[in-house]
Amino acid sequence: MMALDEESIRGLCWERGYSGNVLPEDIPRLESSLSGLRQPGDSLAVDYRVTNHQGKLFFLTCVNTLISSDEKGQVIQRIAFDISQHKELESALTRMSFEDSLTGVFNRNKFSLDVMETRQEREQARLGVACFDLNGLKEINDTQGHSVGDALICRTARHISREFAGKVYRIGGDEFVVVDRGVDEHAFRNAVTEVCNHMRADKISVAVGISWSAACCDIKARFDEADKRMYSAKAAFYESRGGRQQSC
């Protein structure tokens, strides 16, 4: 794993109970585990990360057991297991559970989780929420096929992500939500306008609803307000077939 021979490994500095290849942010957790070994036979497990001399990252879980202790120091047995593949699989499964498979943006599961987490916070200041809903997707699916409709959905996701990378959720077949924390109102509204400009240039029609607050607020309340405004814009679009105000 370390890509070193036995002599090189023995030559590493182990004075602190580990070699210097442990990632700095994992050192406090590892040292806490080692300091918990007080009597011979004490054993504690800990997960941490190391890099070999080639820069490759490994995830380890190890069991540290205190064998003996005297005036010269402690003798600790460490049995380490490489769990890198397990961590990679775990990360992939987490990504799949939160990622929309068609567009690559966050999915409804991730949106629901983020909403619940934020609602449990005491306050959320400077929060902007925008809802985007494609106009005419059903008609396109019915007349041109679902592959054309899927391509339209992907183009829409790309346009939104261009201005709001990492803040976009696809919560329905043709509905996207942006949640932007800490942004000022002018910048937020300008970014939404830019999305609409991209959409219009790409001949994509979308109904948009916006909610922004500088005061302590609830993300669910902001979403409900933006969603309501989006549906009003969508109703206006279908009434006039031209859209007005908050329709792209």
Image (tube, grey):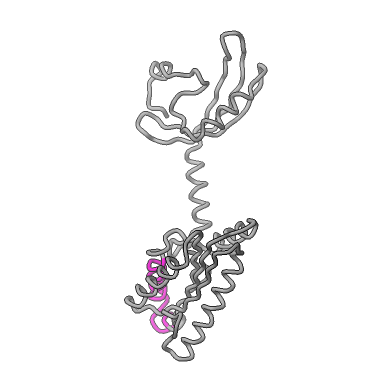
* 50 inside magenta stretch: no
Q: Dividing the image into 4 quarters, which one contains the N terminus?
A: top left
Quadrant of res 143: bottom left
Q: Which is nearer the eye, 236 or 213?
A: 213
Among all residues in the image, which is located at the extreme top?
71
Number of disc labels = 0
Image side of residue 120 versus residue 131, left or right: right
- Residue at 51%, 36% in the rendered image: 83
Task: Establish if 138 lies above or below 223.
Answer: below
Residue span colored magenta: 140-160
Among all residues in the image, which is located at the extreme left?
201
Image side of residue 65 versus residue 242, left or right: right
Q: Dividing the image into 4 quarters, which one contains the C terminus?
A: bottom left
- Residue at 62%, 12% in the rendered image: 69
* 152 inside magenta stretch: yes
Task: Establish if 155 lies above or below 233.
Answer: above
Q: Which is nearer the eye, 181 or 178?
A: 181
**Residue 235 location in percent, x, y?**
51, 86
**Residue 70 location in percent, x, y?**
61, 9
- Residue at 55%, 25% in the rendered image: 79
Task: Establish if 131 lies above or below 182.
Answer: below
**Residue 144 location in percent, x, y?**
38, 81
**Residue 121 location in percent, x, y?**
63, 56
Quadrant of res 220: bottom right
Task: Establish if 173 lies above or below 93.
Answer: below
Quadrant of res 55: top left
